[in-house]
Each structure stands twice: as structure tokens, then as C-alpha cells.
Amino acid sequence: MFVAVTYGLAVVLDLFILFIGARFVLQPVPSAAGYGVPAPPGAYLGVKGVRDATYGVLGLALLAFAGSRPAAWFMLVVALVPLGDTVIVLRNGGTRAVAFGIHFATALVVLLSSALLFLV
């Protein structure tokens, strides 16, 4: 049961960031508003989308082909992204609710996933 929950959480997180990346590519302006810092259409939004989607695919590939330990290291390192997003939102006029309620909370869940994967 523990292993199933651990892998399940990691898969959900990877699929979620893949979805966010696809949304930034397909609907950049609404996605930027949901991120916490509205932005005009432009290449940077697409770049963010591709980056996020790639992280999702990489996380899934590590789970499928490399196992829990490499996936745990990946989750540990990739937790820096939502931590950085927290700072970006705060420094660019976004609300504290979005910065901490979305981005910082996401970082904590990703760190939890990493810890669980290390235990498997």
C-alpha cells in the first residue's frame, strides 16, 4: 500500500506539471494569470510551458525506467522550481496567497514525494 501511494503521488505530480506545461503552450495568457503574475502573450510563456511539460515527462520516465531512487533525487532537485516561482510571484506584484498557497505548497508536496520515494 505504501509503495502504491508513493508512486501514485509521484505520478500525479508529474502528470500535473505536464498538464500545466501544455496549458502554458496552448493558453498562455490565462495560464500566466493563474501562475500569479499576469503577462502579455510572448515567447517566455511558451518557454515556460515547454520547460514544465519536459519536467513532467522526465519525472514519468524516471519512475518507469530508473526506479524510485533516481525519481526521488529528481523530485528533490525539481522542488527548486516552485520555490523559485514563489519568489518570482512575490517580487512581481503577485499575492502572498498565490505565492504561498500555490507555489510554496507545491514545493512542500514535491519534497514530501521525494522523501517518500527515498523510503521505497
Image (cartoon, helix red, strand yellow):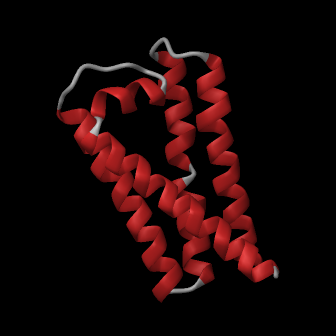
- Measured from the top left, where is residue 5 in percent x and y? 74, 73
- In the displayed structure, 106 sits above or below 34; it is below
- In the displayed structure, 58 sits above or below 79; it is below
Foreground of the two, 112 or 39: 39
- In the displayed structure, 75 sits above or below 41; it is below
Could you tell me if residue 120 is visible in this image?
A: no
How many numbered discs? 0
- Point 48% across, 78% down: residue: 62
**Residue found at the far top of this picture:** 93
Quarter of the rendering occupied by the N terminus:
bottom right
- Point 77% across, 78% down: residue: 119
- Point 23% across, 41% down: residue: 46
The reply, left or right, for residue 45 in relation to residue 62 is left
- In the displayed structure, 52 sits above or below 8; it is above
The reply, left or right, for residue 118 in relation to residue 11 is right
Could you tell me if residue 44 is visible in this image?
A: yes
Determine which quarter of the picture holds residue 101: top right
Foreground of the two, 118 or 50: 50
The reply, left or right, for residue 99 in relation to residue 6 is left
- Point 63% across, 46% down: residue: 107
- Measured from the top left, where is residue 29 in percent x and y? 30, 27
- Measured from the top left, where is residue 47 in percent x and y? 25, 43
- Measured from the top left, where is residue 109 in percent x and y? 69, 52
Foreground of the two, 92 or 33: 33
Quarter of the rendering occupied by the C terminus:
bottom right
**Residue found at the far left of this picture:** 43
